């Protein structure tokens, strides 16, 4: 299993035809003090992840998913501590964050999602403007939702 660490960085203005406009990861991904802005993709305008995503002090702002997960699309374990998920757009599910089980081979792998000290505001989607979660254990603490 690979590991990716990104620290004190800005990822801005990228486009992917399929997944992960800013970041596409199947590995263990750790973000600290990272800003993702103005990225675009079909799913996961800012981030698309099937591995474990741990993020601290992140800003995911103004990203666009043509289908699901304008800001973040997660198929794996997701933990975000301290951050802002704002003004992201998805045409279908999860303007800010879309959380889905990974189907792959066999039964779906249900994931664990933990969001703490997070502001999720001004995001837009047909379903789940801020957060759209299916088949996931979702733990929220100190969250502001205003979508």
Image (cartoon, rainbow, N blue to C red):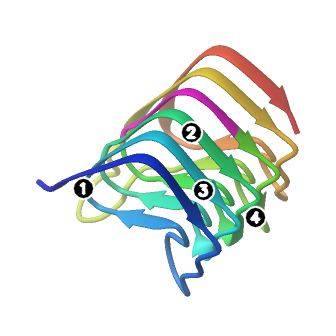
What SS does tag 1 mark? loop
Residue situated in front as seen by the camera: 108 or 140: 140
Q: CA distance from mark 2 to mark 3?
A: 8 Å
| Mark closer to the chain start, 1 or 2 | 1
Q: Main secondary structure of the magenta part?
A: strand
Residue 95, quarter of picture: bottom right
Residue span colored magenta: 77-84
Q: CA distance from mark 4 to mark 1?
A: 26 Å
Is there CB contact under 8 Å for labels 2 and 3? yes
Residue with the mark numbered 3: 36
Q: CA distance from mark 4 to mark 2?
A: 24 Å
| Mark closer to the chain start, 2 or 3 | 3
Pair 4/2: label in front: 2
Residue with the mark numbered 2: 58
What SS does tag 3 mark? strand
Where is residue 57 drawn, in percent x and y? 54, 31
Q: Is residue 110 found left or right of 4 in the rendered image? A: right
| Mark closer to the chain start, 4 or 3 | 3
Q: Which mark is residue 27?
A: 1
Is there CB contact under 8 Å for labels 4 and 3? no
- Residue occupying the far top of the picture: 142
Q: CA distance from mark 1 to mark 2?
A: 19 Å
What SS does tag 2 mark? strand
- Residue occupying the far bottom of the picture: 17
Where is residue 56 drawn, in percent x and y? 47, 31
Residue displayed at 77% across by 56% down: 88
Q: Which mark is residue 92?
A: 4
Is there CB contact under 8 Å for labels 1 and 2? no
User: What crowding class fits label 1: few (fewer than 14 Cα within 10 Å), some (14-19), or many (20 or more)?
Assistant: some
In this figure, what is the number of numbered marks? 4
């Amino acid at each position: 299993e690979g590991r990716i660490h990104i620290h004190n960085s800005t990822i801005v203005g990228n486009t992917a035809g399929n997944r992960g406009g800013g970041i596409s990861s199947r590995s263990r991904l750790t973000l600290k003090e990272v800003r993702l802005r103005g990225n675009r993709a079909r799913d996961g305008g800012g981030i698309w992840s099937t591995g474990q995503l741990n993020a601290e002090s992140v800003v995911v702002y103004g990203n666009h998913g043509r289908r699901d997960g304008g800001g973040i699309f997660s198929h794996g374990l997701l933990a975000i501590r301290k951050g802002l998920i704002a003004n992201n757009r998805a045409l279908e599910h999860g303007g800010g964050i879309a959380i889905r089980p990974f189907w792959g081979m066999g039964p779906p792998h249900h994931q664990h999602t933990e969001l703490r000290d997070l502001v999720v505001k001004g995001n837009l989607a047909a379903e789940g403007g801020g957060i759209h979660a299916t088949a996931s254990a979702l733990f929220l603490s100190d969250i502001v939702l205003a979508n």
